[in-house]
Image: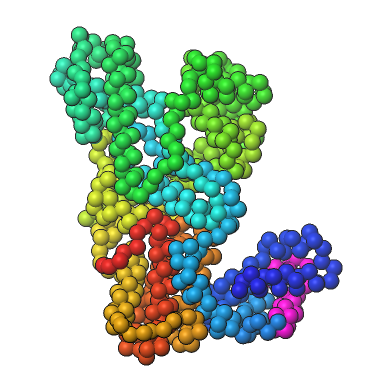
Amino acid sequence: MINIVDKEIKSFLSSINGIDESVLSIINEKYSTTISDDLKNGHLTSNVCMVAASILNLNPKDLAKELEQKLKKLNKFQEIKVAGPGFVNISLNRKDFVSIVDEINNNKEKFGESNLGNGNKIQIEFVSANPTGPLHVGHGRGAAYGDALARILTKTGSIVEKEYYINDAGRQIDILTASVITKLIQKDLGNFSAQNTYKGKYIEEIGIAFSKEKVVTYKEPKLIINNLPGDAEEEIDQLISNLKEMDKKIWNEVKDFSLKNILNLIKQDLENFNVNFDNWFQESSLGDLQDPNSQISSLINKLKEDDKAYEKDGALWLNTDVSGDDKHRVLIRDDGRATYFASDVAYHKNKVDRKFDTLINIWGADHHGYIKRIEASIEALGSNKEKLVVKLVQFANLFKDGKKVKMSTRSGEFFTLKDLIKDIGADAARFYYLSKQADQHLDFDIDLAKSDSKENIFYYIQYAHARIISLEKKFNENNQGKKIGSITTENIAYDKYDKLIHEISKYPNIVKKSAQTLQPHLIIFYLRDLSQLFHSYYNDNHVLSESEENMKSIIFCLSAVRQTIANGLTLLGISPMQKM
């Protein structure tokens, strides 16, 4: 019905004296016709007269009265009212209002789909944690957010590719390799442990697994740790250098084995979290500067040729003025080594070359200062920086038994995503990660997530779904063998559950808004409100004691409520519970 109303509104706007196409286009972009928040304001409401009046310097109430008269002449609506400063509120005929129940029960899991994205090709890169250890609960929020976003955008008509960027060519992988090797030969080193190696139990487990395939020995192991600097950063860098020089073969074998082992752990954890990627992109595939045909070398040459990069103090710099960055950024250091930034620029060139319409990067909030320089690199590569959308995800603070859980990968003291899934399940974890806007801080209480109370919103929503299934089952059992007859919207004259019907009619617009704003938490807020309405209705009405005609239409309506809850949860990657 919104489409019918909007068609008439556009016709009304076109008939206003003196209005031209450009002004008409602006008004059409700005106004909205939506399902009303409250049934007291009718079923639909539009702010078109206020928007148009502000642009055309007219009186919004006078304009609204003109629109009111036009809509009344159509005889398609039960009631039209002008309200407040110029809102037009519309009450639908009963048959049109309840038709949403038929629509949901007929379309089932397709209810809420749209072509909003119009086939746009979108890449979402998320998680992309350094493969130096298992995923901890901090990574879980980005994983849940990115995956839910991909599902929502796909459901609304976009073509989405999910990508994980594997940082397998940097210093952190060297530190991982050094950590495993020194653990393997710890006895030969007199139980030496560098300050900045990784200390988790998983390091020992990787070492044990590797030693089953090959024994690691050095002729003079003590030389590895002789005269190491006292500074922690200098110590680890020298340790890495010593290990590489003493036996390059062992270094490469342990490095490849450790990386593969941890990537397998990450993939398994994500799969258990109901997150799968379409593509795993390796940083190492970009090559290095020593290879003139590598992607990173080609990038540097292009930036030089296009005068986007310049040499200063022996280093190569990218001019980032175009994006408003506070300073220019180094691509190649004065010692000839490429920076992390150079690899990121090469990676984004690769993305641009793959012809995505939109690139969505989901980063931790600590990467805020990195946005401008990446935008500058995209502009320097001849593409529009508007193609890039960066969504920042704030850290999640985890609480268990009333205490904040530590999360330090380097020290080895951290609560893994695997631990969280084991403790409360993937569905509850995903739900709570998505329960708040991603760029806001989240305090995640494990004990609350496990409780069977209305304060646990996850339980509250799932309970609504399971309760309706139970009602449907009892209804079918009570009427077994008895001819019920068809149930259609013609039967829905009873009005005690009109608030529920009104609420489920909002779902498609909630999904669209979630896609437009890239905010999955809007769906959780909606499901919470819908579940609250259902529980209130259920507690005030004994459904199975109603008359047969009422009972049939109530169950028909509640089936639509259940389907809507199921669709919303599924869209977030959460399985609706059949029973509690």
* Residue 548 vertical placement versus 410 (above, below): below
Colouring rule applied to residues: rainbow
Q: Does the magenta stretch include residue 17?
A: no
- Quarter of the view holding residue 164: top left
Where is residue 467 drawn, in percent x and y?
Answer: 31, 73
Counting from the top left corner in percent of width and height, residue 476 is at: 32, 79
Q: Please give left or right for residue 23 compared with residue 435 in the image.
A: right
* Residue 436 in sight in this render: no
**Is residue 59 rendered magenta in the image?**
yes
Foreground: 144 or 158?
158
The N terminus is located in which quarter? bottom right
In the rendered image of this protein, does residue 538 appear above or below residue 332? below
Q: Main secondary structure of the magenta part?
A: helix
Kindly identify the residue that appears in the image at 50 percent across and 81 percent down.
489
Residue at the image position 55 percent from the left and 51 percent from the top: 158
- Placement of the C terminus among the 4 image quadrants: bottom left
- Which segment did they paint magenta? 50-73
